């Protein structure tokens, strides 16, 4: 018997590996079972065998990997044909080390896979409602991009550009955060929208409570935050410039008007022309451009169909000393 010839191996870890390999080949004879049970009776051997068999079983989960098949075949063939103790010891170490490395690689890959961010993106004129893994809903405006990462201790969203409204599933143990520009919006279970436009962050709270703070405002434990934080109440809107070029402003907008974009309408109430143009351009392949930056602050009022830039330009020309000029890629607004 090969095992009988190798029974004098002094390294219990080597024997644990050899027993796993022998058991994987098929049933043991009565004498081999006696040897195995006698060896296993030692507490240290039992622990080593449990560890070795765990690796062996796990390696079976990736057993169709070519590297592992080659190692296993080489070790078993050498075991059957040569009975070389030193060769077997080397191959057993190699097999289990390689299996452990493969299992580690699989584990890391699985962790990355399940924690990788989900991406959501809309094109010009497109809107989308996304149901996140935790049951929260994100309503994306046109030309909007989100990255979402669900973790055990938190739910992290990054708004890369555009606008989205979030209806957050309640989970007090997993805060829901939206990173946008250099700001961070923190919520638990609530309804709010976040927009990045013309260098500013707009946060409108519909239900619940959110806190808006700087993205890098992470003071040491026990220390007071160094940056300003804002806690919003329902019905309020925070406007804060990226880079804090000016103080944040909190107002109380018309909530129904602020959600008109979800129905394909854009409702402006004294909206600066530059911002109104950027919102209109999300819905049209043809773009509106301003001939002069001095026009950017002209207030815009009215309800417009999203994407209808011709009606938008016509309405502005009727109310302000502006005229529209056709361009190859859209419309240019200029002073009369």
Image (cartoon, rainbow, N blue to C red):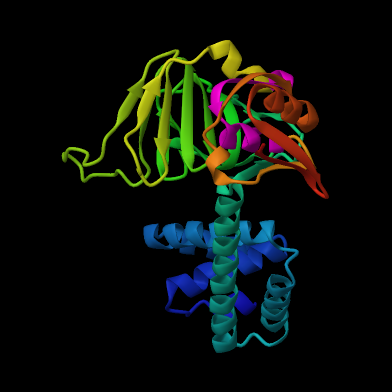
Residue in view at x 70 percent, y 38 percent = 281
Residue 163 visible in the displayed image: yes
Eyeballing the image, is 154 above or below 171?
A: below
Tell me where residue 31 appears, x and y as whole percent. 61, 65
Q: Picture coordinates of residue 198 (x, y %)? A: 53, 41
Q: Percent position (x, y) of residue 277?
A: 64, 35
User: Which range of residues does the magenta coloring cover?
Assistant: 262-281
Looking at the image, which residue is at 38% across and 43% down?
Answer: 215
Q: Residue at x 59, y 30 (%)?
A: 164
Point out residue 226 in the picture as x, y percentages from the top left corner.
Answer: 21, 42
Q: Quadrant of the C terminus?
A: top right
- Assess whether residue 267 is covered by the magenta stretch: yes
Depth check: give the residue in front, 74 or 294: 294
Instruction: Specify whether 247 is left or right of 312.
Output: left
Q: Nearer the viewer, residue 157 or 310?
A: 310
- Based on the picture, tell me whether residue 89 belongs to the magenta stretch: no
């Amino acid at each position: 018997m090969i095992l009988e010839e190798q029974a004098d191996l002094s390294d219990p870890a080597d024997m644990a590996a050899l027993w796993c390999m022998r058991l994987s080949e098929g049933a043991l004879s009565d004498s081999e079972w006696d040897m195995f049970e006698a060896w296993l009776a030692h507490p240290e051997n039992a622990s080593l065998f449990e560890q070795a068999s765990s690796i062996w079983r796990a390696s079976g989960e990736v057993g169709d990997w070519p590297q592992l098949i080659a190692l296993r075949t080489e070790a078993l063939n050498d075991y059957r044909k040569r009975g070389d103790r030193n060769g077997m010891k080397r191959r057993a170490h190699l097999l289990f080390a390689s299996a452990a490395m493969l299992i580690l690689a699989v584990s890391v890959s699985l962790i990355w896979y399940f924690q990788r961010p989900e991406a959501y993106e809309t094109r010009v004129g497109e809107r989308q409602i996304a149901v996140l893994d935790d049951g929260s809903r994100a309503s994306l405006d046109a030309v909007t991009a989100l990255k979402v990462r669900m973790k055990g201790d938190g739910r992290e969203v990054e708004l890369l550009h555009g606008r989205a409204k979030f209806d957050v599933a309640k989970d007090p143990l997993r805060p829901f955060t939206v990173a946008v520009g250099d700001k961070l919006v923190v919520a638990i279970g609530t309804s709010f929208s976040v927009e990045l436009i013309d260098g500013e962050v707009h946060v409108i709270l519909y239900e619940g409570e959110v806190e808006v703070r700087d993205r890098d405002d992470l003071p040491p434990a026990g220390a007071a935050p160094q940056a300003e934080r804002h806690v919003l109440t329902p019905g309020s809107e925070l406007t804060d410039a990226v880079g804090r070029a000016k103080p944040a402003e909190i107002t109380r907008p018309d909530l129904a008007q602020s959600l008109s974009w979800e129905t394909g309408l854009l409702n402006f109430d004294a909206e600066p022309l530059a911002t109104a143009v950027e919102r209109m351009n999300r819905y049209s392949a043809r773009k509106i451009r301003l001939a002069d930056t001095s026009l950017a602050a002209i207030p815009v009022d009215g309800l417009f169909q999203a994407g209808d830039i011709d009606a938008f330009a016509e309405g502005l020309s009727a109310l302000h000393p502006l005229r529209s000029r056709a361009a190859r890629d859209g419309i240019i607004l200029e002073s009369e």
